Image (cartoon, rainbow, N blue to C red):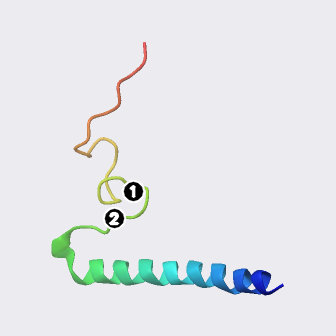
Amino acid sequence: MRDYLIALVLFPALVIAWVVVQNITRRFALKHPEFGPPREEGGGCGGSCCKTSCHFPDPPQGP
């Protein structure tokens, strides 16, 4: 029962902490635009580029 209560408190606390960290980094990026756009998870190069404007080459196309 004790393990269940620990998990019930710990996991939501970790998720809330992660959201707080993301908000802090977004606010920092807004105050310091000289460092470029914030990099969101899964956003590729900077989070705001399209597939056509990235400097990474396109993957090879199949036959």
Toward which corner of the image does residue 13 lie, by quadrant? bottom right
* Residue at 38% across, 84% down: 24
* Callout 2 amino acid: Arg
| Residue behind mark 1 | 43
- The reply, left or right, for residue 4 in relation to residue 57 is right
Position of residue 26 relative to residue 59, above or below, is: below
Q: Which residue lies furthest to the front in this view?
A: 2
Label 2: state its secondary structure. loop
- The reply, left or right, for residue 49 in relation to residue 16 is left
CB under 8 Å between discs 2 and 1: yes
Toward which corner of the image does residue 38 lie, by quadrant? bottom left
- The reply, left or right, for residue 5 in relation to residue 39 is right
x then y, percent, for residue 27: 34, 83
* Residue at 79% across, 87% down: 2
Looking at this view, is 7 or 49 the one in front? Answer: 7
Looking at this view, is 14 or 34 the one in front? Answer: 14
x then y, percent, for residue 15: 58, 78
* Residue at 35% across, 31% down: 59
Q: Callout 1 environment at 10 Å: few (<14), some (14 to 19), or many (20+)? A: few
Label 1: state its secondary structure. loop
Q: Callout 2 environment at 10 Å: few (<14), some (14 to 19), or many (20+)? A: some
Q: Residue furthest right?
A: 1
x then y, percent, for residue 18: 50, 78
Position of residue 17 relative to residue 54, above or below, is: below
* Callout 1 amino acid: Gly
* Residue at 22% across, 44% down: 55
Question: Gap in Å between the C-alphas at discs 2 and 1?
Answer: 6 Å
| Residue behind mark 2 | 39
Quarter of the rendering occupied by the N terminus: bottom right
Looking at this view, is 17 or 30 the one in front? Answer: 17
